[in-house]
Image (cartoon, rainbow, N blue to C red):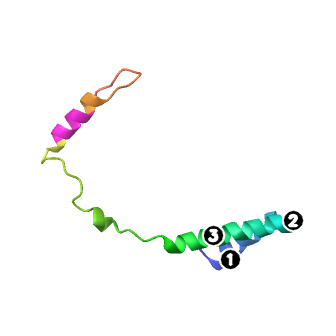
Amino acid sequence: MTTTAFNIKVRNRWNALKYLDYDTKLDIITLLTQSLKLSKKRKHISAKKFYGIWKDDMMSAEELVKILKSERQFNQDIVEL
């Protein structure tokens, strides 16, 4: 995001918040502070962690599609493609 776009977003939000009363602004500050503390605690999880986790008993793609199609339930008629 460019600095200009960032400044515009910040100013737009400030224009919406600047007329709030003192206590409401303090509440917003508290919530923002809490959200920052939570975001620091979140640990980044790489997708590599999940590599190989899916076990399908060596089922072929065609067998999997056949099972999925047989288990589908619709309120309308199924149209074969």
- Nearer the observer, 81 or 9: 9
Provide the secondary structure element on which disc 2 rests: loop
Quickly name the residue at label 2: 21
Provide the secondary structure element on which disc 3 rests: helix
Residue 16 placement, left or right of 72: right
Q: Is residue 81 visible?
A: no
Residue 56 placement, left or right of 27: left
Give the quarter of the image for residue 51. Answer: bottom left
Quarter of the image for the N terminus: give it. Answer: bottom right
Q: Residue 34's mark?
A: 3
Magenta: predominant secondary structure element? helix
Tell me the distance, in whole angstroms, between the alpha carbons under discs 1 and 3. Answer: 27 Å
The residues colored magenta run 62-68
Q: Residue 4's mark?
A: 1
- Check residue 66 for magenta coloring: yes
Tell me the distance, in whole angstroms, between the alpha carbons under discs 1 and 2. Answer: 28 Å
Tell me the kind of residue under disc 3: Gln
Residue 62 placement, left or right of 40: left
